[in-house]
Amino acid sequence: MFKPLIEGLALGLSTGTVCFVTCAPIYLPWMMTEQRGIWKSLQRLLEISAGRFVAYILFGALAGYFGSNIEPLSRELFTGISYILLSAFLVLNAFRTHREGKSCRIPGVVTVSKSAFLLGLFTGINFCPSFLIALSSAVNLGGVVSGMEVFLGFFFGTSVFLLPLALSSYLSILKEVKVLARIASILIALWFIYQGVFNLHHVYQEHQHEKNTYLLDLAEYPFQPVIVASLADSTAAFALRDSLLTIYQAPAVVLPILGKQFDSLTADRDHIILLVFAGSLKDTLVAVKYQDYHHIVIEQGNSHKVPQFLRKTRFKLDIGQKMRFRI
């Protein structure tokens, strides 16, 4: 019953150093921008942990529910958005603490950067190496409860490694340290803005690419099969024609090596699939014209492999692109 929880805890403890290296450069400057006692720092750290806890539980539930259907592009989208939100949060915090140091008025919207919970939430939605391992574990186990248990254990395991950050309160006594912490926060924010914009741009490019591609299922698409074969391959060609009757409604047409025979084909080239025996390519006119169609070139002795290939194969192609393959 508690196996996913134990697995998550073990995972958190084993990858906690990686988590510390990933998150400490974000948390440490944020905590050092203000002077606090150690107990206040511990309270802030607990608030950060609460934000991480909420993010982990939500993603654990989603990973358990959707399983392996969580697409890499969805991960990039979430990561890109969280990086940009985190960057804005860090910049606002640097601006707020700078203004507070000069006893200046702080705009109401800027005070949101005081929330350690939000900082934990933004960093919790971060597909760092440790997080991805936990995500894979939740996906493999399946189920909402199991996914939540994995991330609950992962949360407690990694939280142990973040406790030393509470000692940052001693460093924040020095004014120079707080100034350096604000500068570090801004530099880190710039890095995360770059990473966030890069991720979102990649998601946009992939989305545009998806709009300009299509999936071609060789067995389901209403093809008119056309077999092009030399006299030497005629026996194999007619045997192939008969086997294709179990796949396509339209019976296959067998053409000899006569280039002008292409003129008798329908003008709708998208619905024709040429099955070209390699021996027929010696005819230069055939070799030129078959490139205009979806086609499969069949090497000598491989015609028996074609029906199985057609039944099981799908191609992802750019719009207007023709499928080309050799068996």
Image (cartoon, rainbow, N blue to C red):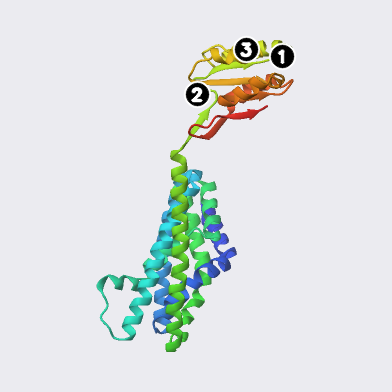
Residue at the image position 55 percent from the left and 59 percent from the top: 129
Q: Which residue is mark 1?
A: 233
Kind of residue sitting beneath label 1: Asp
Up the image or down, 151 lies above or below 37; here it is above
Tag 3 near tag 2, CB within 8 Å: no
> Between 150 and 44, which is closer to the camera in this rendering?
44
* Camera-side mark, 1 or 3: 3
Residue at the image position 39 percent from the left and 80 percent from the top: 40
Distance Cα–Cα, label 1 vs label 3: 11 Å
Is 322 on the left or on the right of 173, as rendered?
right
Kind of residue sitting beneath label 3: Leu
Can residue 259 be seen?
yes
* Identity of the residue furthest to the bottom in this view: 174
The answer to which of marks 1 and 3 sits earlier in the sequence is: 1
> Between 68 and 77, which is closer to the camera in this rendering?
77
Q: Which residue is mark 3?
A: 255
The percent position of residue 98, horizontal first and vertical second, equals: 35, 81
Q: Which residue is mark 2?
A: 270
Packing grade of label 3 (10 A; few <14, some 14-19, many >=20) is: some
Distance Cα–Cα, label 3 vs label 2: 18 Å
Can residue 53 be seen?
no
Quadrant assignment, res 37: bottom left
Distance Cα–Cα, label 2 vs label 1: 26 Å
**Quarter of the image that includes the C terminus:** top right
